[in-house]
Amino acid sequence: MARIFAVANQKGGVGKTTTAVNLSAALAAHGQRVLLVDLDPQGNATMGSGIDKRNLPVSVYHLLLGLRDLPEVRAYSESGAYAVLPANRDLAGAEVELVDLERRENRLKEALRAVDAEYDFVIIDCPPSLSMLTLNGLCAAHGVIIPMQCEYYALEGLSDLVNTIKQVHAKLNRDLRVIGLLRVMYDPRSTLAQQVSAQLEDHFGDKVFKAVIPRNIRLAEAPSHGMPGVVFDKSARGSQAYLAFAEEMIERAKNF
Ligand code: ADP
Ligand code: MG
């Protein structure tokens, strides 16, 4: 049975996509069978996996609207060695079109059932909002991974997200829980980053992943080469951190 994790944070630019892509590739590098779901109309996870979002005959949009089955939509990241449900701008329309459909928040969950036995991990890259698309991600998932920058306003947005997760847990998906907070783009020389990081550990205890992802230019460069950072430059500090994070996820997933 696949363990399904949504990478979510309603803020943009906090490292969701970088985390989803590199976690997928790092899990694959550790021998896991992985499916990455791109739920963001920006299609950054698709591009970062080396799949051209501009040439997609069908995408996750068609899957959510029930126009295609999962195998017809699925692509493969050669560089990352994992399967992808790709996205592009078409997906922006899904937000409105889903509203009229039955069980609209469960579309992804139902679609993923068909491939449950084929993967060890399904990683869902959510858009920067608490929208119907993110809701589909949260309803499909067993757990949420929350990437966070250790900066002054980091904790503010967190309570909205945690409240949404609580509501989804109460009303829509009893399986859902926060797996952990992942510190990303971390600068160990910044006193503020150290303070916020320590605060997170105080408040959230072992919900904070041990792995810390440093700010690392190689991770930012990799997408323009159509490769996950962990493949583009495996020895880079950021890549090593994502490989360690994947090991931690494999350990935590054993408790499911
Ligand atoms: P989100 O998906 O939350 O919008 P992204 O993963 O796209 O965030 O990251 C936002 C920007 O920050 C991108 O340009 C990405 O390359 C860069 N970035 C993400 N993580 C790191 C990191 N650890 N070090 C350096 N740059 C990073
Ligand atoms: Mg993104």
Image (cartoon, rainbow, N blue to C red):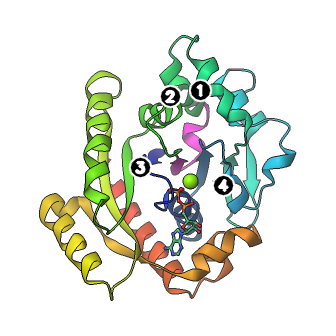
The residue that mark 2 highlights is 132
Mark toward the start of the polypeptide (2 vs 4) = 4
Mark toward the start of the polypeptide (3 vs 1) = 3
The residue that mark 4 highlights is 44
Q: CA distance from mark 2 to mark 4?
A: 19 Å
Amino acid under disc 3: Asn
Amino acid under disc 2: Met
User: Residues at badges 2 and 3 in contact (C-beta under 8 Å)?
Assistant: no
Q: Image height check: is 119 above or below 203?
A: above
Task: State the SS at label 4.
Answer: helix
In percent of width and height, residue 66 lies at 68, 20
Residue farthest front in this picture: 152
Amino acid under disc 1: Glu
User: Residues at badges 1 and 2 in contact (C-beta under 8 Å)?
Assistant: yes
Mark toward the start of the polypeptide (2 vs 3) = 3
Mark toward the start of the polypeptide (3 vs 4) = 3
Q: Is mark 4 within 8 Å of ligand 2?
A: yes
State the mark number for residue 95. 1
User: Residues at badges 4 and 1 in contact (C-beta under 8 Å)?
Assistant: no
- The residue sitting at 73% across, 57% down in the picture is 47
Left or right of 16, for residue 189: left
The answer to whether any part of residue 218 appears in the image is: yes
Q: Quadrant of residue 235?
A: bottom right
The residue that mark 3 highlights is 9
Assess disc 4: are there few (<14), some (14-19) or many (≥20) residues with their C-alpha within 10 Å of its C-alpha.
Answer: many
Q: Is mark 3 within 8 Å of ligand 1?
A: yes
Magenta span covers which residues?
114-125
Left or right of 146, for residue 200: left
Assess disc 3: are there few (<14), some (14-19) or many (≥20) residues with their C-alpha within 10 Å of its C-alpha.
Answer: many
Q: CA distance from mark 1 to mark 2?
A: 6 Å
Q: CA distance from mark 3 to mark 1?
A: 18 Å
State the mark number for residue 211. none
